[in-house]
Image (spheres, grey):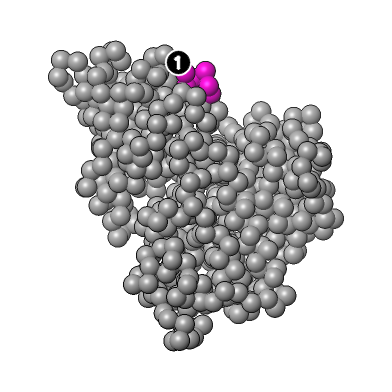
Amino acid sequence: MKCHHVKVYPSQDNLPKEQQLAWQIAMVAHDRVPLDHEVEEMIVNRLIDNTAVAIAAINRKPVANARTQALAHPRPDGATVYGLPIEQRFCAEWAAWANGTAVRELDFHDTFLAADYAHPGDAIAPLLAVAQQMQVSGNELLSGIATAYEIHIGLVKGICLHQHKIDHMAHLAPAVVAGLGTLLRLEPNVTYQAVQQAVHTSFTTRQSRKGEISSWKAYVPGYAGKLAIEAVDRAMRGEMSPSPIYEGEDSVIAWLLDGPEACYEVAFPEAGESKRAILESYTKAHSAEYQAQAVIDLAFDLRTAVSEEDAIEEVVIHTSHHTHVVIGSGSNDPQKYDPQASRETLDHSIMYIFTIAFQDGRWHHEESYTRARATRADTVRLWNKVKTVEDPEWTRRYHHPEPNKRAFGSRVEVRLAGGSTIERELAVANAHPNGKTPFERTDYLRKFTLLTQDLITPREHERYLGAVQRLGELHADELALLNVEIPKETLLANTRDERGIF
């Protein structure tokens, strides 16, 4: 890996583009190295994962609305949209919008956590859409996805956004552009210009993940993917960009991140080096914020050790700073204890998540979030006994420089009447690569089957899984096979409507 020193320069220095981070991103995209077999296999896993969670969310309101917007932008030689027939095609940017929303809605696909955090699989939907429209092969798509993961994870390791309340789509958009640069074999200068446009337009605040969290959280990846596609389109037409977008004296670093004295270290592969970053990311076994994954596993364990729920006086979750302030009681968001809160808010309340997992002994992507489930009297009673506490040791482990030693879990204390305490701790979720039961291909296939079984036909199930598992062999005209069709009578919002502008 090559480490790039990123800092702010005054305009009079006229920093050469070859020394800019956006150019380094473009050069990684331009470096078309052969992919390792295990990287190709993991990309297939993540395609299966994305499609599974997208289909499971297919009739939820944000997803249905995004789909109706895409329906207003048909294009005969365009891209497919989840749920609709393969023969129906749409403008790539709108397919990316609809499919990205579907993938993100349930908060149930892959994650990477470091200095910042991300769902790097969010890049797949826009890359697939463009690959379908631009008629490239499955092998080209594999290369584009590998590049997007490399850039996304490199940025997440090196530049913290959430410290400054900037939403993490600011790393997703340039990662998508880089993936498109590889996918379309763009010249470095085109990718360089598009990266800067995408960064410039994708810096938004974290209010989207604060307080009463709305459906916009689901739309963010589709929006970032759409921005990235449009930036690449403009750059391919010769348009220029704000430059240098990271290092300029009025840039995003100077005014939105660490400021004029900032200095970041961002590492990307050397020329010719394998692109393996996807192997550092991990998916979810439970449909909830990633930092809650290990706590769900702990709750399943603890419920067998606590015989009387009424004897619980308090539950204290000792965890990292990030978990405490983002999804814990350290956020100071009263909505995280509100039984009337939105699904998106409950998904970001580790207190609620622990309570439901403890009481039910299972986690379901829909039933665990229903209003009836959240308002149950015994649930509200226990929920209000749960709090988080920041533990410096868990924070240190969360940010450990060696990926295999990072811990995203917690230590949970259940304090009982009479003074006794039951404790359990778990460094990583069971499904994590370093966990008790790491996700393998069979787990991804099982997840796909469980999430789609009531929505697609057995024939469609077999057809899709057969196609996706030979991704590297697919010709350009076969990429549409990576869509999944829902029977028309099952799919809501399957025709264009007139409620909006489009």
Disc 1 element: loop
Using the rendered image of the protein, determine whether residue 122 is visible from the camera's viewpoint.
Answer: yes
The residue drawn where x is 21% and y is 19% is 416
The residue at the point 74 percent across, 32 percent down is 492
- In the image, is 23 to the left or to the right of 262? right
Q: Specify start and end residues of the magenta stretch as a single range.
A: 370-376
Image quarter hosting the N terminus: bottom left
In the displayed structure image, the side of residue 363 where residue 127 appears, left or right? right
Would you place residue 451 above or below residue 22 in this image? Answer: above
Q: Is residue 94 left or right of residue 282?
A: right
**Image quadrant where residue 489 sits:** top right
**Can residue 372 be found in the magenta stretch?**
yes
User: Which quarter of the picture shows residue 214?
Assistant: top right
Mark 1 is on which residue type? Answer: Arg
Observer-nearest of 379 and 309? 379
Where residue 277 appears, x then y in whole percent? 45, 61
User: What residue would you read off at disc 1?
Assistant: 376
